[in-house]
Image (cartoon, helix red, strand yellow):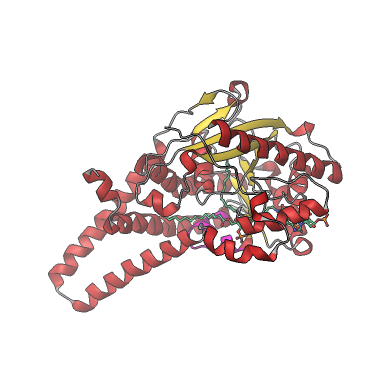
Amino acid sequence: MGLVQWLKGQFLCHLVICYGFFVSGLLINLLQICTLPLWPINKQLARRINCKLGYSLTSQSVALLEWWSGTEITLYTDPENYRLYGKENAIVVLNHNFEIDFLCGWTFCDRFGVLGASKCLAKKELSYLPVIGWMWYFLEMVFIKRKWEEDKRNFVQSLQNLRDYPENFWFLLHCEGTRFTEEKHLVSMEVAEKKSLPKLKHHLLPRTKGFWVAVQNLRGTVAAVYCCTLNFRNNETPTLLGVLNGEKYHPDLYVRRIPLESIPEDEAECSAWLHKLYQEKDKFQEDYNQTGCFPGPKVTPPCRPWALINWLGWTCLLLYPLCLLLVQLVNSGSILSILATVAFCAAVSVCVRWMIGQTEVKSRDDLFTTSTKCNLQLKDFLPAPKHHSHD
Ligand SMILES: CCCCC/C=C\C/C=C\CCCCCCCC(=O)SCCNC(=O)CCNC(=O)[C@H](O)C(C)(C)COP(=O)(O)OP(=O)(O)OC[C@H]1O[C@@H](n2cnc3c(N)ncnc32)[C@H](O)[C@@H]1OP(=O)(O)O
Ligand SMILES: CCCCCCCCCCCCCCCCCC(=O)OC[C@@H](O)COP(=O)(O)O
């Protein structure tokens, strides 16, 4: 292991990264609060400023993935459609299997210049996450409690608000509604069986209402649905902690562009359409396991320097006062001040570790013990062994 790789694994480096992320995040949140008086006067300007502020925070984690861990996403897509990415609004439908799927999504957004404005249909609990959740509030992210009767008014209103959004945005929808685990898969395939739907091997059964409501309310605003299928080579199970440790992963992303006009307006037909889409996505995953690639030509969208410049800027800005403070502390010899500083660093690291914990998926072993609740057999759905190894 080289010196640089060794350094990337050191707790002190992680502490500096987390300190930069957390403190810059709090400052960004503060600046976002300062935009509040602007909303009634010039809403579009307030939204644009918040997009830039959002970019300044979110892109730090993109820089971590691209520059710190060296992870490069390979994109499989039609070159004709590629020209449109970033130049139109879109609903993104993405499989929800990996702990860093949101990070790969953000990287993809950054490559096409829509990172600051990108949105997601997210569970309400995420809005309480320090720094990130508070930032999302100002970016008009759509949050749901997953109780339809309570959600529907706010959900529709939040989507309607996006109709005059001043920047191009992608709206991410994980139709499966939760991360893929073996146990959830078994339960979900029981539902598929009851509904006489074909069983999926690599996806949970999609929940259709959210998709239908999003499509109906964003007609005329959004040009297309981007059907995205993400997978990692060599059976990698990427984690955010791995990224922080500088581990390099190999994600492959297959994107198909589907014009919104081609999606049925009627709820039942739209649901059937989405189920069919997931059957196709399942086939792509299966083929990927067999052949090691998705259909279509490969493209690597050019990496932009802004995420790195922003990250280095924040790091320098925040490390300078920290170093001054540490020197002063040592010189002062005050035990109380030193203890207070250590306590602050510990609090930052615990808080960020807790946030990282929110991205983690329950381990397979835990789930094997509970899967006996289901009538279906686990082996019926387990992915076929992968025969191919890649770069
Ligand atoms: C690569 C490019 C990326 C671009 C990235 C762009 C932007 C990035 C920006 C930010 C990134 C941040 C990332 C944050 C990630 C956040 C992830 C989440 O929080 S996921 C959780 C929240 N999201 C969802 O839940 C969305 C999916 N769910 C829905 O849409 C639902 O429809 C709903 C709106 C929540 C409503 O659900 P509800 O159950 O009330 O209604 P449904 O009609 O959908 O379902 C009822 C129906 O389902 C049947 N059922 C029961 N059990 C199951 C089961 N286990 N699986 C499937 N179906 C089930 C039930 O029988 C009902 O059927 P019926 O109606 O016939 O009786
Ligand atoms: C420089 C950068 C340093 C970065 C270090 C800190 C980064 C902290 C990142 C916080 C990331 C917040 C994004 C969380 C997205 C997690 C996805 C998620 O939580 O999905 C939930 C769904 O599945 C539903 O879950 P269930 O309730 O069904 O189970």
Viewer-side residue, 229 vs 27: 229
What residue is shown at x 65% (from left), y 36% (from top)? 227
Viewer-side residue, 70 vs 262: 70
User: Is 133 a magenta residue?
Assistant: yes
Quarter of the figure with residue 305:
top left
Q: Main secondary structure of the magenta part?
A: helix
What residue is shown at x 84% (from left), y 46% (from top)? 267
Quarter of the figure with residue 201:
top right
User: Is 283 a magenta residue?
Assistant: no
Q: Is residue 139 left or right of residue 345?
A: right
Q: Is residue 155 left or right of residue 115?
A: right
* Residue 77 rendering spot, x and y as whole percentages: 59, 27
* Residue 61 rendering spot, x and y as whole percentages: 43, 48
Q: Is residue 130 above or below residue 70?
A: below
What residue is shown at x 29% (from left), y 59% (from top)? 11
**Image quarter of the N terminus:** top left
- Magenta stretch bounds: 125-136
Quarter of the figure with residue 76:
top right
* Residue 239 rendering spot, x and y as whole percentages: 45, 52
Count the marks: how many? 0
Q: Looking at the image, can residue 222 be seen?
A: yes
Q: Pick out the residue farthest to the bottom.
A: 336
Q: Looking at the image, can residue 134 be seen?
A: no
**Image quarter of the C terminus:** top left
Q: Is residue 333 above or below residue 143?
A: below
* Residue 359 rendering spot, x and y as whole percentages: 51, 57
